Amino acid sequence: MHHFQYKGNDLYCEDMAVEKIAKEVGTPFYLYSKETLEHHFKVFDKAFLDVPHITCYAVKANSNIAILDIFGSLGSGADIVSGGELFRALRAGMSPDRIVYSGVGKKIEEIDFALKSNILMFNIESSQELEVINQRTEKLGKKARISIRINPDVDPKTHPYISTGLKKSKFGIDIKKALNEYRRSRELKNIEVVGVDCHIGSQITEIGPFRDAVRKIREIVVTLASEGFAIKYLDLGGGLGIPYHVEEPPQPDEYARTIIEEVRGLGCTLILEPGRLLVGNAGILVTKVLYTKDGEEKSFVIVDAGMNDLIRPSIYGSFHFIQPVKKEERKNAMVDVVGPVCESGDFLASARQMPEARPGELLAVMSAGAYGFAMSSNYNSRPRVAEVLVQGDRYYIIRKRETFEDLIRLEEIQE
């Protein structure tokens, strides 16, 4: 469900006309629906209402502090993968005892920041990381609560770049070695083992991979319990997909039923880490058509948003539905929708049948709320775009558009 609908011939976000916002804010810009964000969180969280759980939003999907504030106000914790994401989560008012820290490359200063912030737990991704965290606890006089991220070697059947639970993945510790790491952690006086962690990938559209992973992880939890470990938390990551095009991913209630059935009797609090599921269809990218061009083999619609604004189509071949902000009767054409960036890989759609576009009109790139602005860059010295949040019939700029001055603010010419 989302709140981007046509009213008559005009595309609206909740009760605001997208065209009106574009005239006042300029293009390109990201546009989010607050009602959609809240609805998605409540539906997901409610699906696990019958079991102890913490929903920890995956900050990497969209890290704007206004969005973190919305989820935090609904009781969300945070799944973070960097010191910067921890800073954002805390600045947005999220409680540190609902923050879990994943990621294979935690730097010492980031570990110290998390220890001083007293986060819920670290998800350990390597033997050496465990050693470093133990060393930092001794230096700072802190204790670290940890789980070990187990790599269950389950194929999530998604894009290879966002598959994280296979043997060849850089993430986690091989399931066959994990028990030894747990046993070793007992010898570290400032380390408290509290959980088991697993995350197999993103944009997963079948229930089977989740079931397979949980069954493997369950065996580990049972074995640890038999050896006297007090496992309080079972962190199952995120990864549930959304419909971009023809996908039909499981609904949160089906996902929850499957998970709850598989973990029955373990006595753990579940930690769930939805990201894309909450924000993906809650946001769009609004862009203006600059030119159209017919080549010998292809026709192009050239817009003012590029791969630096939305890189998913370029690196993943991802599909985003593109529609006109003002709907009119017109014929379709086969086109590439491309941006101004000086790369042949700069496209938002390739070989796409869509209504003929005209210079000056607005297009909406749908389902762009996740891994959109969060992955954007200043490539080609392009200022990053504005982010706008709609609530009912009002809108709020939650990130100002960058200026040329912003591009060089941290740079200096050597004397």
Image (cartoon, rainbow, N blue to C red):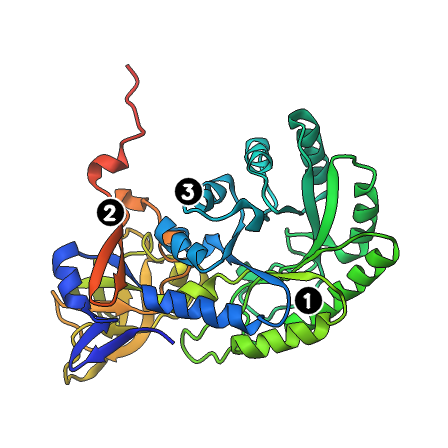
Q: Which residue is mark 1?
A: 154
Count the marks: how many? Answer: 3
Q: Residue furthest top?
A: 415
The amino acid sitting under disc 3 is Arg
Looking at the image, which is closer to me, 145 or 210? Answer: 145
Which residue is under mark 2? 400
Disc 2 or 3, which lies upstream in sequence? 3
Image height check: is 12 above or below 151? below
Q: Position of residue 256 (x, y in %)?
A: 60, 74
Residue 398 in view of the camera: yes
Is residue 290 visible to us here?
A: no
| Foreground: disc 2 or disc 3 | 3
| Residue at image location 37% in from the left, 51% down from the top | 64
Q: Position of residue 115 (x, y in %)?
A: 60, 36
In the picture of the structure, the residue carrying the numbered disc 3 is: 91
Q: Amino acid at mark 1?
A: Val
| Residue 375 image position (x, y, % from top left) | 40, 52
Image point (59%, 39%), residue name: 118
Residue at 47% over, 53% down: 59
